[in-house]
Image (cartoon, helix red, strand yellow):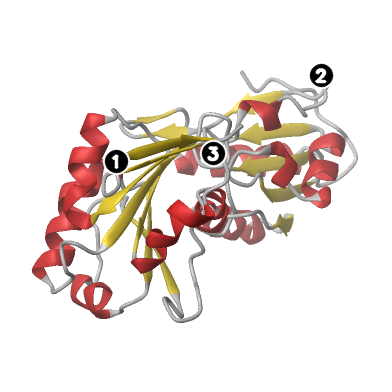
Amino acid sequence: MFKLVTKDIGVGKVFLVGAGPGDADLITVKALRCIQTADIILYDRLVSDDIRSLFPATTPAFYVGKAMGHHCIPQDQLNALLIEKAQKGFSICRLKGGDPFVFGRGGEEMLALKQQGIEVEVVPGVTSGVGAAAYAGIPVTHRGTSQACTFITAHAEKELNVDWQALARLDHTLVFYMGLNKLPDIRQQLTTHGLAADTPAALIENGCRKEQRVFTGSVSDLEGLAKQHKLQSPTLVVIGHVVELAESLHWFGSLTSSNSEWTQLSA
């Protein structure tokens, strides 16, 4: 699968590149340059088709993504692969959805590479907690409504270690990544620890992509909305009063509000 001739030019370099949340127009100039000049591209599951279409036809590109319950390649083996190819002199574009350092395990890969003396450069990307929310017409902060935002991963290797009491009392925007299969836990834990069940909430499926769908309601509606509309990953969960702005600020994709029972489609 990864058979490439050795480049006898010394140790190569790895670029940890953020591809953003899906829209190819959101990747940075530097990210595009890395894609165009790398010897090898290793890309994740959340790198969209539109972005993959930018890969040079002559550059070997390999899928190394992870989905719930299935890892194409375990993380330790992926780290070893990056080290092996860099030591053989290849320039590697390690392309990740969103930003490499926001729930992207970029830090783990960089540590493994640096420990082997391999040069690494990070190319930040637009993280979905900002990008997908913006494409849904939801500003994660808004004067008079929310002065701060917290990003939380709803996925963990073993157990989700979250201070639910603190989150429930923050009174600002909460954004859960990879939260679709944890909606019952998110609702129960937040409401048990004091968050009002009628707090506005949104589910953003395929944010920043042509097929984006947005569903708004309250925290108590989340599970029902996901089941009713058969939502699939990737779906972002946004909780807080900024969600109420979606109806006025919505501009992309589709929006369905369980409160006003209306659907809008962008042109």
| Secondary structure found at label 2 | loop
Q: What number is the disc on residue 15? A: none
- In the rendered structure, the answer to whether residue 194 lies left or right of residue 127 reads left
In 3D space, how far apart are the residues under numbered discs 2 and 3 (Cα atoms)? Answer: 23 Å
| Residue of label 1 | 261
Mark whose residue sits in front, 2 or 1: 1
Q: Amino acid at mark 2?
A: Ala
| Amino acid at circle 1 | Glu
- Mark 3, secondary structure of its residue: helix
- Mark 1–mark 3 Cα distance, whole angstroms, equals 46 Å
Mark sitting on residue 78? 3
- Residue lying at 42% horizontally and 76% vertically, measured from the top left: 146
Residue 156 falls left or right of residue 135:
left
In the picture of the structure, the residue carrying the numbered disc 2 is 57
Q: Residues within 10 Å of mark 3 (few under 14, many from 20)?
A: some
User: Can you tell which quarter of the image residue 52 is in?
Assistant: top right
- Is residue 186 shown left or right of residue 99? left
Q: Position of residue 77 (x, y in %)?
A: 50, 37
